[in-house]
């Protein structure tokens, strides 16, 4: 069925606030509506409909109301599907990169090669990076596996800070942990994964 914004019966018709064709309230980068004293955040202000996106929008709106220079302009908003195993992603997906015609290279590290995944009996995971092949910038991260929702924070930080694959590769990760699969995947980008064999 999907979800839609609950923008009816709020009295918005008595303001200059405007709705888009889907019923979302139109806002600027500070979450201000066309009625400059009215702000909108969360599901009412558009996709993605995620609580953590709404919380961040709320902080931006409060700072804007207080006169601080604040805008909502994230490069990455993490999403998690709390299944077993969990699915988590941020930034560009492989399909989005293809649709945009964006040059990209996809590298992935199978958790079958992870010492930590082996010790907890959960080798059914994968860590995937979408990387710009020219600049090495991390464009997106996808993780499938137990605890993926916890692990995606590092991926989100990498995308948000425009980190390069070499940044992840050179960041020392604790061993044995699932988080080191981020480092292992970035090593594969350079063709020398420590725990995986890569054919040319």
Image (spheres, rainbow, N blue to C red):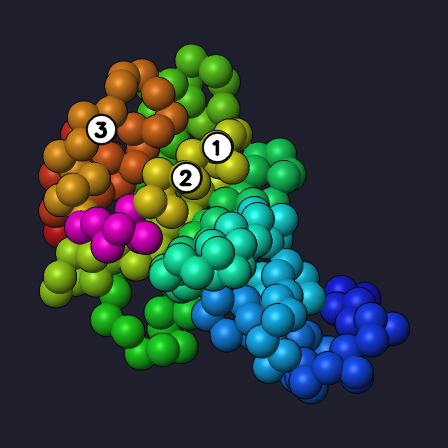
Disc nearer the start of the sequence (3/2):
2
Image quadrant assignment for residue 123: top left
Q: Which residue is mark 2?
A: 153
Q: Residue at x 52, y 30 (%)?
A: 146
Residue 195's mark? 3
Comparing marks 1 and 3, which lies closer to the viewer? Answer: 1
2 and 1 marks in contact (CB < 8 Å): yes
Q: Residue at x 21, y 62 (%)?
A: 132
- The residue positioned 27% from the left and 17% from the top of the image is 175
State the mark number for residue 150.
1
Instruction: Give the percent coordinates (x, y) of residue 122.
Output: 49, 24
Q: Are marks 1 and 3 in contact (CB under 8 Å)?
A: no
Q: Mark 2: which secondary structure?
A: helix
- Judged left or right of residue 99, residue 37 is right
Q: CA distance from mark 2 to mark 1?
A: 6 Å
Left or right of residue 54, residue 89 in this image: left
Foreground pick, 49 / 108: 49
Sooner in the amino-acid sequence: mark 1 or mark 3: 1
């Amino acid at each position: 069925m999907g979800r839609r914004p609950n923008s009816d019966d709020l009295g918005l018709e008595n303001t200059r606030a405007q709705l888009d064709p889907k019923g979302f309230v139109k806002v600027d980068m500070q979450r201000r509506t066309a009625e400059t004293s009215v702000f909108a955040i969360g599901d009412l202000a558009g996709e993605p409909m995620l609580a953590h996106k709404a919380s961040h929008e709320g902080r931006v709106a409060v700072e804007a109301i207080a006169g601080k220079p604040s805008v909502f302009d994230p490069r990455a908003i993490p999403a998690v599907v709390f299944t077993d195993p969990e699915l988590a992603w941020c930034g560009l997906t492989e399909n989005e990169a293809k649709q945009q015609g964006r040059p990209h290279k996809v590298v992935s590290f199978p958790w079958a090669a992870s010492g930590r995944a082996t010790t907890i009996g959960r080798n059914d995971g994968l860590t995937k990076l979408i990387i710009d092949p020219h600049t090495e910038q991390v464009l997106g991260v996808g993780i499938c596996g137990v605890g993926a929702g916890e692990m995606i924070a590092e991926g989100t930080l990498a995308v948000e800070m425009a980190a390069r694959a070499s940044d992840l590769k050179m960041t020392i990760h604790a061993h044995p942990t699932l988080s080191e699969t981020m480092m292992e995947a970035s090593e594969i980008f350079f063709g020398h994964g420590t725990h995986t064999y890569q054919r040319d």
